[in-house]
Image (cartoon, rainbow, N blue to C red):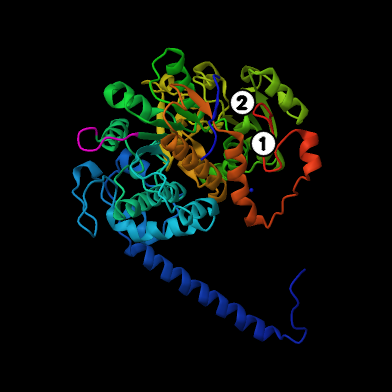
Amino acid sequence: MLKAAESRRTPQGQDRDDAEESGTGELVTEALKTDMQIQFTDQKQEFNKRPVNAGRRSLSRSISQSSTDSYSSAYSESSEDESSPRDKSQKTSKGLSDFCIKNIKQAEFGRKEIEIAQQEMPALMFLRKSAGEKPLAGAKVAGCTHITAQTAVLIETLSALGAQCRWAACNIFSTQNAVAAALADRGTPVFAWKGESEDDFWWCIDRCVGAESWQPNMILDDGGDLTHWIYKKHPSLFKRMKGIVEESVTGIYRLYQLSKAGKLSVPAMNVNDSVTKQKFDNLYCCKESILDGLKRTTDVMFGGKQLVVCGYGEVGKGCCAALKALGAVVYVTEVDPICALQACMDGFRVIKLSEVVRHVDMVITCTGNKNVVGREHLDKMRNGCIICNMGHSSTEIDLASLRTSEMRWVRVRPQVDHIIWPDGKRVVLLAEGRLLNLSCSTVPSFVLSITATTQALALIELYSAPEGRYKQDVYLLPKKMDEYVASLHLPTFDAHLTELTDEQAKYLGISKHGPFKPSYYRY
């Protein structure tokens, strides 16, 4: 088993036949015209066959429908009824009913999505093959993360390692309904669907905890909402937990607040600040998915556009690099002088948002903070400015100030709203200010394999640790664990590590088998 973790408080012209006669050419032209008329007539007839929806779709349905879901037309959201999953009684093929999802009939398609993701998640598949002794036997894991094909691979890996799992979603837009159905069909109680209301969100978390019939002893959280719910609603249960694993900036901040106040009665692992999360999930994942999310929702061309990215942490760095590569003019806002200096050295102009907000074409938040874009900024934005968030929390844009009687909200696409001012100015809001990439597009499975493997190992470490190893505090993952996760993914690239000689290891004062960097080393 791994050593105790380190405590921390903190991608001309076409040749023609010279011999062609004019008569032949005219015949060809007439044939083409006739063919085009036939095709147009067929299309028109087909169009006329389609039923016209005379009624207005409800907001809940328009939110749940998404052109970005990777589903076939046979499983499209538009084919489903508008009733809430909470009002429906569903059972799996084996008669199980302990779940609440959109449509259990999508399970077969969701299983295919999970199988595709498995091919890009080698480390988790390795953990399954080497499970053997079931290191999580007896663990009851309550999870609150994005429910995607990639997360499903993690959940089923935890089950293969011996854990019992119950799951809810940490984001009301990111759940892939077919994947949730596939999980439920295989026996994992899942309470989530795409387009939940705020009330649905907390109802699902409460059902996930199941404090009366099933009591968790481990928490795997993304954002801290599940941890917060158990702490507030089930304090006695919270005190009996064996460990918490948290992967987001927002959730870690909340854990440190509890620790500082002396109210954290359970050891917690800070996955967010591990190297395998910061440098891979935050940086490389966002570098690829920011473009995907923006293209799918707005069809915007980035070349020559002026953009401002709020925050130059790992997420901000990934977003800036991707946007700059496509020819956008990128500005950065920062509060941290070190991150600001990094942005300057990378060739970005560091400014205050108020200095450029009048003329930029897009504003992207990546801070994890609240009210980074306030009403004073929104009022000054140019007509057609696009606003989106790449941070976990939905608090970075002050949307509450825009939900007033004089402001008009118009849903123009799934996850795309026009907010219209009284003078006719409009800004384009994506995903209602929630996480853009997981709400409006997909993320690379391979990168998520790295984070998911880190989460799995953190759960094993906390659950298997001898009594007294971990106190009631927040811990960083040991460097050895980060290196192990990275090593499990190297075979994919046929990468061959250089081995230190005994003399070299002695010279550096380290073991030739690692860890190779001290805990304070910054990659």
Between 142 and 503, the one nearer to me in the picture: 503
Determine the main secondary structure of the stretch shown in magenta. Answer: loop
Q: Is residue 237 visible?
A: yes
Residue topped by disc 1: 305
Sequence-earlier tag: 2 or 1: 1
Q: Is residue 396 left or right of residue 287?
A: left
Q: State which region is magenta.
A: 211-217
Q: Is residue 166 left or right of residue 325?
A: left
Q: Is residue 198 magenta?
A: no
Q: Is residue 214 magenta?
A: yes
Q: Position of residue 251 (x, y in %)?
A: 46, 27
In this rendering, the label closer to the viewer, 2 or 1: 2
Crowding at dot 1, Cα within 10 Å, few <14 / some 14-19 / many 20+, comes out as some
Q: Is residue 77 visible?
A: no
Which element is circle 1 on? loop
Residue 392 higher or lower than 265, as above or below: below
Q: Amino acid at mark 2?
A: Gly
